[in-house]
Image (cartoon, grey):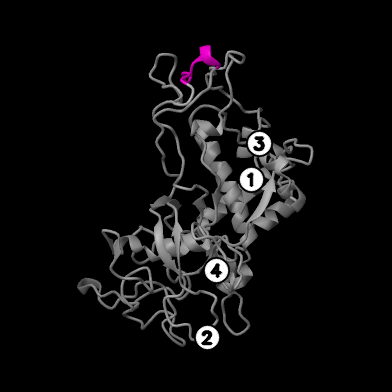
């Protein structure tokens, strides 16, 4: 089975980007004061507590804003098998950003190229990054050209990557987070671009934020702390670095795929959708393109692309990531083409138990701190290892102040 997935940022109300109005103002520069204590922000005379002013969010590369809201999640047609694993339920999804298209072969080859260059002494890491091209192989079908050509030939650059498992998808999210944030710091002149980085020297967002990445620091930010006037590293509070990329939850994916933003008027929904477009038909009703397929579907038994001379979908297998018409959010191929990964684990009946806001199945609580409260050291790949929080720790209220991280 061919597989692909989309990436979105872990953010409650959108993606955080570069601050276009400066990091902070100096004393007397209109930086404001605390509404609770009256002490002025961004003043070395008051201890130098820094607060970013007039911050504005910016989307990461290739992302589309998805305005959240409430919708009925679950089946849209009759459950003829009576599985009862997608019972309709009203939930709320907060706003987020999502990739405009599927991850393409050229996107994944960029990832593999970086892994080979930086982790060349770790052959297993390189092997784990490669997609399984044998997903094309069928004992009674001649798909060998896809086994050898689909991932690497330039003719398929813009086709969705297939043969990627869930763990690989999550590793890609980690890599993309670090590469995007590294680019932001390089563009701001804060760190040097190091083409020779290897192994544990590879840039990691968490390693940088925890003070374990000093080799390539080119410039420090101005420090208003009177005890550290020489400068400081970028902090997450500065709004320069982006939050972590991750897979969408099942609710987020279904909400984005439906594109119901085009069917609402004054808090009324005029039509619930079966597909990312209105109606119950898979062909375009518009006069100029009437009858053309709206997505890359199997049209019927033995019919994968239509009749020669008038091919309606043209793609026997996956099509390019910007095929057909985008939905009302501007997302392509949210129906058909290839299967997509989401963050949730599959539990048939957990839809009855998940939260009504941002429902999700599969939380695993992890922390970068050891049992003594010390922050973990980066590993041989330059990443900060996390460990699962034990039930005893979770039950011990004294541990609640330890900045636990929810690893989805």
Residue beneath disc 3: 207
At x 74%, y 53%, the residue is 391
Q: In the figure, 294 relative to 140: above or below? A: above
Residue 41 position within the rendered picture, expressed as x and y whole percent measured from the top left: 47, 21
Residue beneath disc 1: 405
Q: Nearer the viewer, residue 50 or 280?
A: 50
Q: Nearer the viewer, mark 3 or mark 2?
A: 2
Q: Secondary structure at mark 4?
A: helix
Going from N to C along the chain, the mark reached first, 1 or 2, is 2
How far is disc 4 from disc 1 in space, using C-alphas?
24 Å
Q: Are marks 4 and 1 in contact (CB under 8 Å)?
A: no
Residue beneath disc 2: 81
Q: Residues within 10 Å of mark 4 (few under 14, many from 20)?
A: many
The single residue placed furthest to the left in the displayed view is 287
Q: In the figure, 340 relative to 221: above or below? A: below
Going from N to C along the chain, the mark reached first, 3 or 2, is 2
Q: Secondary structure at mark 2?
A: loop
Going from N to C along the chain, the mark reached first, 2 or 4, is 2
Residue beneath disc 4: 351
How far is disc 1 from disc 3 in space, using C-alphas?
15 Å
Q: Nearer the viewer, mark 3 or mark 4?
A: 4
Q: Quadrant of the N terminus?
A: bottom right
Residue 399 position within the rendered picture, expressed as x and y whole percent measured from the top left: 71, 41
Residue 278 position within the rendered picture, expressed as x and y whole percent measured from the top left: 31, 71
At x 55%, y 34%, the residue is 236
Q: In the figure, 29 relative to 172: above or below? A: above
Q: Quadrant of the C terminus?
A: bottom right
Image: magenta residue range: 38-47
| Figure quadrant of residue 226 | top right
Q: Secondary structure at mark 3?
A: helix
């Amino acid at each position: 089975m061919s597989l692909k997935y989309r990436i979105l940022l872990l953010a409650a109300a959108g993606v955080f980007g570069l601050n276009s109005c400066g990091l902070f103002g100096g004393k007397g520069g209109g930086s404001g004061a605390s509404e609770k204590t009256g002490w002025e922000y961004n003043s070395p005379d008051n201890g130098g507590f820094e607060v970013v002013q007039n911050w504005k969010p910016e989307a990461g590369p290739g992302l589309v804003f998805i305005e959240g809201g409430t919708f009925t999640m679950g089946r849209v047609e009759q459950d003829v098998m009576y599985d009862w694993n997608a019972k309709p339920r009203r939930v709320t999804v907060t706003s987020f950003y999502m990739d405009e298209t599927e991850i393409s072969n050229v996107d994944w080859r960029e990832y593999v190229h970086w892994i080979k260059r930086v982790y060349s002494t770790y052959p297993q890491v390189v092997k784990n990054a490669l997609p399984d091209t044998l997903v094309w192989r069928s004992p009674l079908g001649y798909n060998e050209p896809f086994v050898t050509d689909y991932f690497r030939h330039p003719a398929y650059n813009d086709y969705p990557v297939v043969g990627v498992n869930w763990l690989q998808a999550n590793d890609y999210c980690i890599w993309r987070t670090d590469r995007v944030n590294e680019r932001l710091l390089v563009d701001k002149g804060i760190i040097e671009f190091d083409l020779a980085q290897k192994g544990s020297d590879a840039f990691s967002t968490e390693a940088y934020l925890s003070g374990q990445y000093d080799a390539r620091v080119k410039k420090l930010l101005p420090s208003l702390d009177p005890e550290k006037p020489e400068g400081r590293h970028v902090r997450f509070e500065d709004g320069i670095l982006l939050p972590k990329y991750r897979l969408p939850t099942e609710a987020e994916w279904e909400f984005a795929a439906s594109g119901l933003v085009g069917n609402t008027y004054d808090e009324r929904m005029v039509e619930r959708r079966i597909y990312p477009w209105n109606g119950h038909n898979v062909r375009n009703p518009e006069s100029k393109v009437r009858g053309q397929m709206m997505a890359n579907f199997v049209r019927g038994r033995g019919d994968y692309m239509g009749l020669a001379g008038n091919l309606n979908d043209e793609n026997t297998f996956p099509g390019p990531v910007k095929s057909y018409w985008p939905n009302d959010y501007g997302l392509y191929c949210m129906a058909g083409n290839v299967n997509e990964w989401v963050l949730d684990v599959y539990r048939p009946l957990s839809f009855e138990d998940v939260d009504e806001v941002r429902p999700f199945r599969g939380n695993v609580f992890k922390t970068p701190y050891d049992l003594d409260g010390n922050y973990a050291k980066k590993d041989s790949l330059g990443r900060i290892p996390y460990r699962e929080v034990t039930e005893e720790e979770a039950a011990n209220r004294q541990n609640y102040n330890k900045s636990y991280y929810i690893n989805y």
